Amino acid sequence: MINKLTLIGRCGKDARVGVTQKGTNYASVSVAASAGKDDSTWFDVVAYDKQAEWLAKATKGAVVYVEG
């Protein structure tokens, strides 16, 4: 079975960045995606290494496209 998610939404806060205990860079952000005007679903997105460098630039309200 293969699961794949494609998500386009807006960041709820600026991205949080850090380093794991093993020295891997990571970035995380909450993304709101809505199917209608009044209902949003929130997704927690975490990226590592090269993808974390890109996600670390995300600010509150920025539109992001996530696939994985």
Image (cartoon, rainbow, N blue to C red):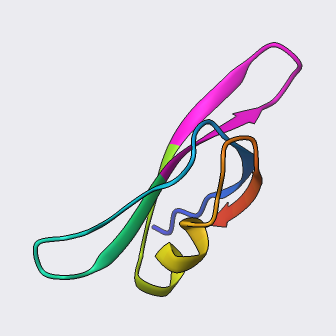
The majority secondary structure of the magenta stretch comes to strand
Residue lying at the far bottom of the rendered structure: 50
Give residue 19's quadrant in the image. Answer: bottom left
Does 58 lie within the magenta span?
A: no
Query: In which quadrant of the rendered image does the N terminus lie?
Result: bottom left
Residue shown at 54% from the left, 66% from the top: 56
Q: Is residue 55 left or right of residue 40?
A: left
**Residue range (magenta):** 29-43
Residue 45 can be seen, yes or no? yes
Q: Is residue 22 above or below residue 65?
A: below
On whether residue 35 falls in the magenta region, the answer is: yes
Q: Indicate the position of residue 43 as horizontal and vertical percent values.
A: 54, 41
Q: Residue at x 74, y 17 (%)?
A: 39
Q: Residue at x 44, y 55 (%)?
A: 28
Left or right position of 43 against 39:
left
The residue shown at (86%, 22%) is: 36
> Farthest residue in the top direction?
38
- In the image, residue 20 lies at what x, y percent? 19, 70
